Amino acid sequence: MQILTPHVYWAQRHRDIYLRVELSDAKNLDISLQDNNTLLFRAQGHGAKGDNEYRFSLEFLEPVRPEISHKSTQRQVDIKIKKQEERWWGRLTLQEKKPLFLAPDFDRWLDESDAEMEISVESRTFTVPFTVHFNSPVSSAYLGLKKGYLFMYNLVQFLGFSWIFVNMTVRLFILGQDSFYDTFHTTADMMYFCQMMAVLEVINPLLGLVKTGFLPAMIQVAGRNVILFVIFGSLEDMQNKPVVFFVFYLWSTIEIFRYPFYMLACISTEWKLLTWLRYSLWIPLYPLGVVAEAVAVIQSLPIFDETRLFSLPLPAVLGHSLSFSFTLQLYLVLMFLGLFINFRHLYKQRRRRYRLKKRKVH
Ligand SMILES: CCCCCCCCCCCCC/C=C/C(=O)SCCNC(=O)CCNC(=O)[C@H](O)C(C)(C)COP(=O)(O)OP(=O)(O)OC[C@H]1O[C@@H](n2cnc3c(N)ncnc32)[C@H](O)[C@@H]1OP(=O)(O)O
C-alpha cells in the first residue's frame, strides 16, 4: 500500500491549534507528540489519493502540551492541540517554508485581533458548569439543544417581524399615506412581543450561545426599547405620528433578512443572496433608522415638557422638577455614539465575512 500525505488545514487561537485532516472514514488512527513540538499522524482512510495509509508530521513553531484531543468523523479528522504558552504564533511550523500539504482553515480562521475579541467575549460569558469535550456525547446533546433553541428563537422573530412588515406594506398599498397615522395601533402589540423577546439577544452572548459582542447587542436592544416603550408606548400623542411608520418599517426591513440568515446558519446552510442582504442592507438602513428614532425623540421633547411625565422632583431652591426632556437630550447624544459603535461593529462583521470568503475562493 502506498504511503501518502493528506491535506491538512490549520487555524489557531491564543491557547489552541486546530488541525483538520481531510481523510474520510479514518481507521487505525495513531496521533502522537514527539519532543514537545512535533506531531506525528498516521491513519488509514479515504483521502485525495483514494483508500490508503496517510501520514504527516508537523514540527510546531513552539512547544505544545502533550494532551491532544481528536475527533474522527465520516468526512475528516479534527485535532485540537493546546499551546504550552498562551500566545499568538506568527506561523504554524518551525520551518519557514510552509509544507505543501498544509493550508489555512478559513472556516475557523481568525486574525489575532479577532481572536482577542473572541477571548474578551468568552471572559464575559458564564462558564458551562461541566467540561465539554468536543467529541463527547454531552457536547453533541448540548450543541443540538443550543441549535434547536436558536433556530426556534430566530423563527419566532422572523414570523413576528414578517407579520409587521407585510401588514404595513399591505396597508400602505391600500390606504397610501393615511396608513402612516395608525401604524402603532395596528402593529404595536406584535412589536412589543418581538422587542421583549429580543432581550434574549443580550442574554445569548452572555451565555456564550452566539458569537455576538455583548455591547453591540445591548446598544441595539436598549436603543430600540427606549423608543418603543418610553417614547411611543408611554406618550399617546406620539402614537399617531407618521414617524412610527418609518421607525417600524426600517426595523422590520432588516429583521426579515437577518433572522432567516441566522436560521440557515443554525442548520449550517447559506444562501449567498441572503448573506449579502444581511451584511449590506444595514449600510443604508442603520443610519436611516437612527435618524428616524432621533426625529421621534425630538418630537417627544415638548410633550414630556408639557405633561411632566417621568420628570425628576428637585429641591425647592432648584425649581420644582427636572423635565424628562433633559434626559432625552442627553440620550440623543448617546444615540449617535451608539450608531458609531454599531456601525463600526457591523462594518467589521461584513469585512470579516467577505475577507474569509475571498480567501476561500483563491
Ligand atoms: C450600554 C447601553 C447604552 C444604551 C444607549 C442606547 C443608544 C442607542 C443608539 C443606537 C440605536 C440603534 C437602534 C436601532 C436601529 C435599527 O435597528 S435601524 C434598522 C437597521 N438595523 C440594523 O441593521 C441592525 C441589525 N442588528 C444587528 O445586526 C445586530 O443586532 C447587531 C448586534 C448590531 C450585530 O449582529 P452580530 O450578531 O454581532 O453580527 P453577525 O455577524 O450577524 O453574528 C455574529 C455571529 O453570531 C451568530 N449569531 C448571532 N446571532 C445569532 C442568532 N440569533 N442565531 C444564530 N446565530 C447567531 C452569527 O451567525 C454569526 O456567526 P458566524 O457566521 O459563525 O460568524
Image (cartoon, grey):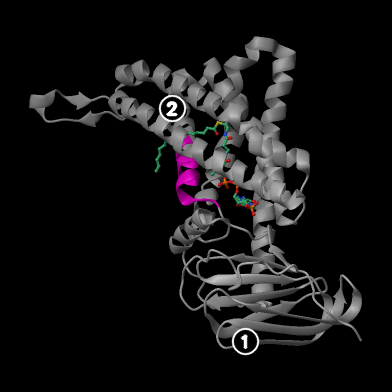
Q: Which residue is mark 2?
A: 231
In the image, residue 142 sits, relative to residue 327, either above or below, namely: below
Instruction: Tell me the distance, in whole angstroms, between the alpha carbons under discs 1 and 2.
Output: 63 Å
Kind of residue at badge 2: Ile
The segment highlighted magenta reads: 212-223
Residue pictured at 65% horizontal, 58% vertical: 149
Number of residues whose C-alpha sits closer than 10 Å to that of mark 1, classed few (under 14), some (14–19) or many (20 or more): some
Residue 179 image point, x, y percent: 64, 15
- The answer to whether the beta carbon of the residue marked 1 is less than 8 Å from any atom of ligand 1 is no
Residue pictured at 55% horizontal, 71% vertical: 16
Residue pictured at 63% horizontal, 59% vertical: 109
Q: Earlier in the sequence, mark 1 or mark 2?
A: 1
Which callout, 1 or 2, points to the residue nearer the camera?
A: 1
Res 33 label: 1
Residue 290 image point, x, y percent: 49, 27
In the image, residue 137 sits, relative to residue 200, either above or below, namely: below
Compared across the picture, whether 76 is left or right of 313 comes to: right
**Mark 2: secondary structure:** helix
What secondary structure characterizes most of the magenta part? helix
Q: Nearer the viewer, residue 211 or 353?
A: 353
Kind of residue at badge 1: Leu
Compared across the picture, whether 179 is left or right of 112 comes to: right
**Mark 1: secondary structure:** strand
Q: Quadrant of the N terminus?
A: bottom right
- Residue 95 among magenta residues: no
Picture quadrant of residue 51 = bottom right
Residue 175 image point, x, y percent: 70, 12
